[in-house]
Image (cartoon, grey):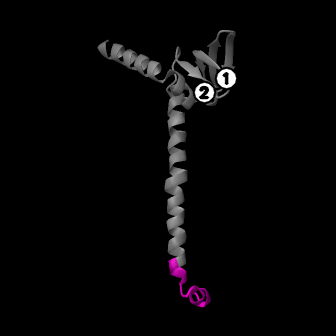
Amino acid sequence: MLTLFLQAPAQGNSTTMLMMMGVMIVGFYFLMIRPQMRKQKQEKKFQDDLKVGSRVVLTSGLHGRIAQIQEDGVVIETLSGKLKFEKAAISREFTENRFGEKATKAAEKKEAETEKK
């Protein structure tokens, strides 16, 4: 019986093939491209919302506190001194893993204080 199916001529037409290709492209968009774009937007928003005094972790693993925010980067204060880095070197994922709850509570506290004033 299997040999009959293997010997049968292909009866699919080109519209079915095009529809399948379209479904695959849409699937790739929703499974790969869209989540990556969302992650990039979150990273950009995180870097734009950085404030002086925030504790951060860089992609290299360096921990520190933001001392200054400049046009072309940030100055990070560490135990060994002050170092200048690009904003892109600050990792949202590492920072949230290390200081997530503390950073969130501190930000909420600052927002509540500014709302009272």
Q: Which mark is residue 90?
A: 2
Seen in the image, is 94 located left or right of residue 61?
Answer: left
**What segment is highlighted magenta in the picture?**
1-16
Q: Quadrant of the N terminus?
A: bottom right
Alpha carbon separation for disc pair 1 and 2: 8 Å
Looking at the image, the residue that sits furthest to the front is 1
Seen in the image, is 80 located left or right of residue 94?
Answer: right
Q: Which mark is residue 47?
A: none
Seen in the image, is 19 located left or right of residue 77?
Answer: left
Q: Residue at x 46, y 18 (%)?
A: 102
Residue type for callout 1 = Phe
Indicate whether 92 appears above or below 78: below
Q: Residue at x 33, y 16 (%)?
A: 112
Residue type for callout 2 = Ile
Looking at the image, the residue that sits furthest to the left is 116
Q: Nearer the viewer, residue 26 or 111?
A: 26
The image quadrant that residue 73 belongs to is top right
Task: For marks 1 and 2, give the one nearer the viewer.
Answer: 2
Q: Residues within 10 Å of mark 1 (few under 14, many from 20)?
A: some
In percent of width and height, residue 72 lies at 64, 25
In percent of width and height, residue 104 lies at 43, 22
- Is 77 a magenta residue? no
Residue linked to disc 1: 85
Q: Nearer the viewer, residue 43 or 21?
A: 21
- Is 11 a magenta residue? yes
Q: Nearer the viewer, residue 69 or 26?
A: 26
The image quadrant that residue 63 belongs to is top right
In percent of width and height, residue 23 lies at 50, 67
The reply to whether callout 1 and callout 2 are in contact (CB within 8 Å) is: yes
Q: Disc 1 on helix, strand or loop?
A: strand
